[in-house]
Amino acid sequence: MTTRVHYLIPWGLLLLAALASLLFGAGSLPWQEAASALVGQGHEDARFVLLELRLPRLAVGATVGLALGVAGALLQALTRNPLAEPGLLGVSAGSAFAVSLAILFGASTATLTTLVAQAGALAGCALVLAATRLQGTGQDPVRLVLAGATVTGLLLSLTSLLMLIDQRAADEIRFWITGSVAGRQWHQWWATLPSLALATVVILTVIRPLASLALGERVAMGLGHRPGLIRLLVILVVALLVGAATALAGPLVFVGLVVPFAARALAGADIRRTLWLCLPIGPALVVFADTLSRLLVAPSELPLGVITALVGAPVLMVIVRARRMPTL
């Protein structure tokens, strides 16, 4: 009974976050009129705000939260490191640098393809993992984060350098890099679905071998699995997920850290149960943070990345300052 409650609570929170996202915003539309439009009544302006502005924003926010939460859980299971997170391991920074480079060469955030962001995410993740493996410190949580912070700092510096080259590109990169789902449209959401569907198929393929890999490489090999292939597929999935999320909302840090942390607190260390709980917790976190970003300084909006950082930074401090570093 307790286990069922643990699984139902996140879905209930997601429902409440979605409802709040549709009813409340930075504009002048009262929540009562938004509620009327939600049930098919109300005037035309209210229905337009609800269906053409807030509903796509909700879908994008939920998709971004799901992708980053699942990516964080997979990275942590792969490295057996509770601090592994796309924003801390260079994955998001690599994606952001690739997108900034594309913007510099004439692309815009409206026409940006997810392929560019995914290629950058794959390069950033591979760079950090290769650096830690060369130093023989891939299983050390703190050193892995330090390597990720170094690569992230390098890529962010290169992104800042790109902003000095072209003023037009600088304005667009500066707005995009803070993270936001404002103004996103349905066609941008639809463009990410093929890569998310591919990632889902690969996850269903590797989830059981990945769970056995947590028992050690020898055990996994004894069960007939190939650890090298498992790692390669997981890295590919992380790049697909983070690249899609970054193309939609820009680089959002700490989401991939907070979501698996909360899921493991409810479900334990089993990666299969953790992933199931990441499905509602990730979207609920990002949708709630996006709603909060609209309400705190209305009628203006705070960058979504600021809210996620304010939520995630304390969680990182709790993990690092724990007397015993949790292992996976």
Image: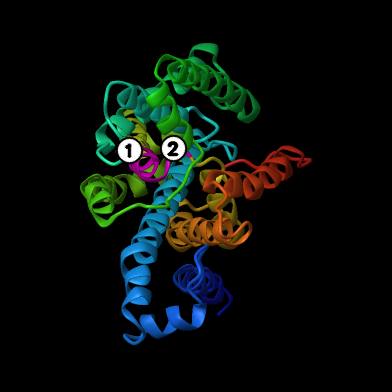
In the image, 294 versus 243, the foreground residue is 294
Most common SS among magenta residues: helix
List x then y, in percent, for residue 289: 55, 57
- The residue indicated by pointer 1 is 109
Residue 7 percent across, percent down from the top left: 50, 70
Type of amino acid at the residue the image marks with label 1: Thr
2, 299: nearer the viewer: 299
Question: The magenta stretch spans which residues?
Answer: 240-251
As shown in the figure, which amino acid type bears the numbered disc 2?
Trp
* Residue holding disc 2: 176
Q: Residue at x 31, y 44 (%)?
A: 206
Task: Check whether the beta carbons of the residues at disc 1 and disc 2 lie within 8 A of each other.
Answer: yes
Under circle 2, the secondary element is helix
291 above or below 85?
Answer: below
Q: How many marks?
A: 2
Quarter of the image for residue 2 reads bottom right
Residue 286 belongs to the span the image colors magenta: no
Image quarter (top left, top right, bottom left or bottom right) of the C terminus: top right
- Whether residue 245 is in magenta: the answer is yes
Report the residue at 23% width, 52% height from top. 187
